[in-house]
Amino acid sequence: MSATLSRSVHIVVAAVVVALAPCAPARGAGGTIRLVTDDTPDGYVYSLSGSGNDRFISEYEGPDPFEPSSIVCGARVREHAAGYPPLGTMGGDLRREDPVNPGPDLSPAGLIADVDPESMDTCSTTSARPRFFTFGHGSGIAAERVTQFISAIEPVHGSFPTDFCGVILDTNSPPQGKSKTYSGGTFGAIPWNHRARRSARE
Protein backbone atom coordinates (compact mmCIF):
# COMPACT_ATOMS: atom_id res chain seq x y z
CA MET A 1 0.00 0.00 0.00
CA SER A 2 1.20 3.48 -0.81
CA ALA A 3 -0.06 6.14 1.57
CA THR A 4 0.69 9.78 2.22
CA LEU A 5 -0.01 11.41 5.57
CA SER A 6 0.20 15.16 6.04
CA ARG A 7 -0.85 17.84 8.48
CA SER A 8 -3.05 20.53 6.98
CA VAL A 9 -3.50 23.98 8.46
CA HIS A 10 -6.80 24.14 6.60
CA ILE A 11 -8.44 21.50 8.78
CA VAL A 12 -10.86 23.30 11.08
CA VAL A 13 -13.57 20.77 11.86
CA ALA A 14 -13.26 17.21 13.09
CA ALA A 15 -14.32 14.33 10.94
CA VAL A 16 -13.36 11.55 8.61
CA VAL A 17 -14.53 9.42 5.77
CA VAL A 18 -17.02 6.63 5.37
CA ALA A 19 -19.58 6.81 8.11
CA LEU A 20 -22.92 5.26 7.23
CA ALA A 21 -25.67 7.75 7.91
CA PRO A 22 -29.45 8.19 8.12
CA CYS A 23 -31.92 9.93 5.82
CA ALA A 24 -32.87 13.36 7.14
CA PRO A 25 -36.25 12.21 8.56
CA ALA A 26 -34.52 9.42 10.45
CA ARG A 27 -33.03 11.78 13.01
CA GLY A 28 -36.48 12.45 14.37
CA ALA A 29 -37.90 8.99 13.82
CA GLY A 30 -35.83 6.62 15.88
CA GLY A 31 -32.62 6.74 13.82
CA THR A 32 -29.45 5.67 15.60
CA ILE A 33 -25.83 6.80 15.56
CA ARG A 34 -23.15 4.50 17.01
CA LEU A 35 -19.71 5.99 17.69
CA VAL A 36 -16.74 3.79 16.85
CA THR A 37 -14.01 6.11 18.18
CA ASP A 38 -13.85 8.90 20.75
CA ASP A 39 -14.80 11.41 18.05
CA THR A 40 -11.68 13.58 18.44
CA PRO A 41 -9.82 13.67 15.11
CA ASP A 42 -6.66 15.76 15.01
CA GLY A 43 -6.45 17.27 11.53
CA TYR A 44 -4.28 14.74 9.69
CA VAL A 45 -5.17 14.13 6.06
CA TYR A 46 -4.05 11.05 4.19
CA SER A 47 -4.06 9.84 0.61
CA LEU A 48 -3.31 6.63 -1.26
CA SER A 49 -1.55 6.08 -4.60
CA GLY A 50 -3.87 8.20 -6.74
CA SER A 51 -4.53 5.49 -9.31
CA GLY A 52 -8.23 6.31 -9.46
CA ASN A 53 -9.13 2.88 -8.07
CA ASP A 54 -7.85 3.13 -4.49
CA ARG A 55 -10.32 2.96 -1.62
CA PHE A 56 -10.67 4.37 1.90
CA ILE A 57 -12.77 1.70 3.63
CA SER A 58 -14.71 1.35 6.88
CA GLU A 59 -16.04 -2.01 8.03
CA TYR A 60 -19.45 -2.56 9.64
CA GLU A 61 -19.24 -6.02 11.11
CA GLY A 62 -22.12 -8.47 10.77
CA PRO A 63 -24.20 -10.44 11.14
CA ASP A 64 -26.24 -7.52 12.47
CA PRO A 65 -24.58 -4.12 11.86
CA PHE A 66 -28.11 -2.68 11.74
CA GLU A 67 -31.42 -3.53 13.27
CA PRO A 68 -33.92 -5.54 11.20
CA SER A 69 -35.86 -3.44 8.68
CA SER A 70 -33.35 -0.57 8.85
CA ILE A 71 -32.82 1.73 5.88
CA VAL A 72 -29.25 2.78 5.07
CA CYS A 73 -29.59 6.25 3.64
CA GLY A 74 -26.07 7.35 2.89
CA ALA A 75 -22.48 7.86 3.96
CA ARG A 76 -20.83 10.95 5.38
CA VAL A 77 -17.35 11.67 4.00
CA ARG A 78 -14.84 14.22 5.34
CA GLU A 79 -12.80 14.81 2.21
CA HIS A 80 -10.21 17.52 1.80
CA ALA A 81 -8.22 18.91 -1.14
CA ALA A 82 -5.42 21.40 -0.47
CA GLY A 83 -3.88 21.40 -3.94
CA TYR A 84 -4.48 23.18 -7.22
CA PRO A 85 -7.44 22.82 -9.62
CA PRO A 86 -8.67 20.85 -11.37
CA LEU A 87 -9.75 18.91 -8.28
CA GLY A 88 -10.94 15.32 -8.52
CA THR A 89 -14.29 13.85 -7.52
CA MET A 90 -14.55 11.17 -4.84
CA GLY A 91 -16.76 8.19 -5.65
CA GLY A 92 -18.07 5.46 -3.40
CA ASP A 93 -20.03 2.27 -2.90
CA LEU A 94 -21.33 -0.18 -0.31
CA ARG A 95 -20.22 -3.82 -0.60
CA ARG A 96 -20.50 -7.22 1.02
CA GLU A 97 -17.49 -9.03 2.47
CA ASP A 98 -15.21 -10.95 0.13
CA PRO A 99 -15.21 -14.62 1.22
CA VAL A 100 -11.49 -15.01 0.40
CA ASN A 101 -9.97 -11.54 0.99
CA PRO A 102 -9.92 -9.38 4.14
CA GLY A 103 -12.15 -6.65 2.79
CA PRO A 104 -15.01 -5.81 0.44
CA ASP A 105 -15.90 -8.07 -2.47
CA LEU A 106 -14.96 -6.01 -5.52
CA SER A 107 -16.69 -8.34 -7.97
CA PRO A 108 -20.16 -7.51 -9.34
CA ALA A 109 -21.63 -10.00 -6.85
CA GLY A 110 -20.28 -7.97 -3.93
CA LEU A 111 -21.99 -4.70 -4.78
CA ILE A 112 -24.86 -3.65 -2.53
CA ALA A 113 -25.19 -0.10 -3.88
CA ASP A 114 -23.22 2.60 -5.67
CA VAL A 115 -23.49 6.10 -4.26
CA ASP A 116 -25.91 8.30 -6.16
CA PRO A 117 -24.15 10.32 -8.90
CA GLU A 118 -26.14 13.39 -7.88
CA SER A 119 -24.50 13.27 -4.42
CA MET A 120 -20.97 13.40 -5.89
CA ASP A 121 -19.11 16.62 -6.63
CA THR A 122 -15.64 18.11 -6.91
CA CYS A 123 -13.52 17.42 -3.82
CA SER A 124 -14.08 19.98 -1.09
CA THR A 125 -11.40 22.52 -0.20
CA THR A 126 -12.81 22.92 3.31
CA SER A 127 -13.34 20.33 6.01
CA ALA A 128 -16.09 22.44 7.57
CA ARG A 129 -18.78 20.66 5.55
CA PRO A 130 -18.82 16.90 4.99
CA ARG A 131 -19.77 15.28 1.73
CA PHE A 132 -22.98 13.32 2.12
CA PHE A 133 -23.23 10.42 -0.30
CA THR A 134 -26.75 9.05 -0.73
CA PHE A 135 -28.13 5.69 -1.83
CA GLY A 136 -31.32 4.92 -3.71
CA HIS A 137 -31.63 8.46 -5.13
CA GLY A 138 -31.97 9.82 -1.63
CA SER A 139 -34.53 7.26 -0.45
CA GLY A 140 -31.99 4.82 0.99
CA ILE A 141 -31.66 1.06 0.62
CA ALA A 142 -32.71 -1.85 2.78
CA ALA A 143 -29.92 -2.81 5.19
CA GLU A 144 -28.47 -6.28 4.77
CA ARG A 145 -27.66 -8.09 8.01
CA VAL A 146 -24.17 -9.10 6.92
CA THR A 147 -20.70 -7.62 7.29
CA GLN A 148 -20.44 -4.74 4.84
CA PHE A 149 -17.90 -2.16 3.79
CA ILE A 150 -18.47 1.44 2.79
CA SER A 151 -15.73 2.82 0.52
CA ALA A 152 -14.77 6.27 -0.64
CA ILE A 153 -12.90 5.87 -3.94
CA GLU A 154 -9.94 8.22 -4.31
CA PRO A 155 -9.71 10.22 -7.56
CA VAL A 156 -6.52 10.46 -9.60
CA HIS A 157 -3.81 12.69 -8.12
CA GLY A 158 -2.65 15.89 -9.80
CA SER A 159 0.86 17.02 -10.64
CA PHE A 160 1.91 18.52 -7.29
CA PRO A 161 2.39 16.66 -3.97
CA THR A 162 -0.69 18.31 -2.43
CA ASP A 163 -2.90 17.68 -5.47
CA PHE A 164 -5.01 14.90 -4.00
CA CYS A 165 -8.46 14.42 -2.51
CA GLY A 166 -7.69 12.94 0.90
CA VAL A 167 -9.63 12.14 4.04
CA ILE A 168 -9.19 13.18 7.65
CA LEU A 169 -8.06 10.80 10.38
CA ASP A 170 -8.61 10.24 14.07
CA THR A 171 -5.17 9.24 15.38
CA ASN A 172 -6.04 9.93 19.04
CA SER A 173 -8.28 6.94 19.68
CA PRO A 174 -7.05 3.37 20.18
CA PRO A 175 -7.12 1.60 16.79
CA GLN A 176 -10.41 -0.25 16.29
CA GLY A 177 -9.25 -2.37 13.35
CA LYS A 178 -12.20 -1.24 11.20
CA SER A 179 -10.40 1.29 8.98
CA LYS A 180 -8.95 -0.31 5.88
CA THR A 181 -7.54 0.52 2.46
CA TYR A 182 -7.34 -0.90 -1.02
CA SER A 183 -4.35 0.41 -2.99
CA GLY A 184 -2.25 -1.00 -5.80
CA GLY A 185 -4.45 -4.08 -5.96
CA THR A 186 -3.80 -4.97 -2.31
CA PHE A 187 -6.00 -4.75 0.79
CA GLY A 188 -4.44 -3.25 3.88
CA ALA A 189 -5.26 -1.65 7.22
CA ILE A 190 -4.16 1.59 8.83
CA PRO A 191 -2.95 2.00 12.43
CA TRP A 192 -5.47 4.81 13.03
CA ASN A 193 -9.21 5.28 12.71
CA HIS A 194 -11.53 6.84 10.22
CA ARG A 195 -13.84 8.70 12.60
CA ALA A 196 -16.70 6.31 11.92
CA ARG A 197 -20.33 6.59 12.83
CA ARG A 198 -23.01 4.28 11.63
CA SER A 199 -26.66 5.10 11.61
CA ALA A 200 -29.88 4.13 9.96
CA ARG A 201 -33.61 4.69 9.92
CA GLU A 202 -35.18 1.78 11.73
Image (cartoon, grey):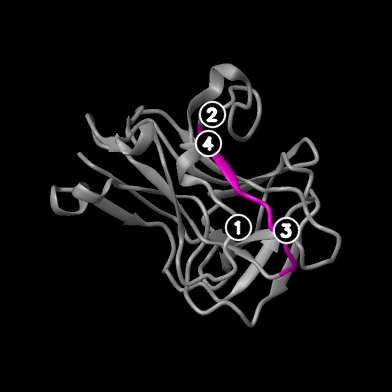
Give the Cα separation between the discs numbered 3 and 4: 23 Å
Q: Residues within 10 Å of mark 2 (few under 14, many from 20)?
A: many
Q: Above or below — where is 77 with respect to 91?
A: below
Residue holding disc 4: 93
Say which label, 3 or 4, has the lower sequence index: 3
Check disc 3 and give the amino acid type.
Pro
Q: Above or below — where is 156 with respect to 105?
A: below
Check whether the beta carbons of the residues at disc 2 and disc 1 lie within 8 A of each other: no
Residue 78 in magenta?
no
Give the Cα separation between the discs numbered 1 and 4: 17 Å
The nearer-to-camera label among 3 and 4 is: 3
Give me the residue at 28% from left, 46% from top: 23
Residue holding disc 3: 86
Give me the residue at 46% from left, 74% from top: 40
Q: In which image quadrant can residue 109 be found?
A: top right
Residue holding disc 2: 97
Check whether the beta carbons of the residues at disc 3 and disc 1 lie within 8 A of each other: no
SS category of the residue bearing label 2: loop
Q: Residue farthest to the top?
A: 109
Check disc 4 and give the amino acid type.
Asp
In the image: residue 180, left or right of residue 86: left
Q: Estimate the x, y position of residue 51 in percent, counting from the top left.
A: 79, 44
Q: Residue farthest to the right?
A: 159
The nearer-to-camera label among 3 and 1 is: 3
Q: Above or below — where is 148 with respect to 36?
A: above
Check whether the beta carbons of the residues at disc 3 and disc 4 lie within 8 A of each other: no
Give me the residue at 57% from left, 63% from top: 124
Check disc 1 and give the amino acid type.
Cys
Q: Which residues are magenta?
A: 83-94
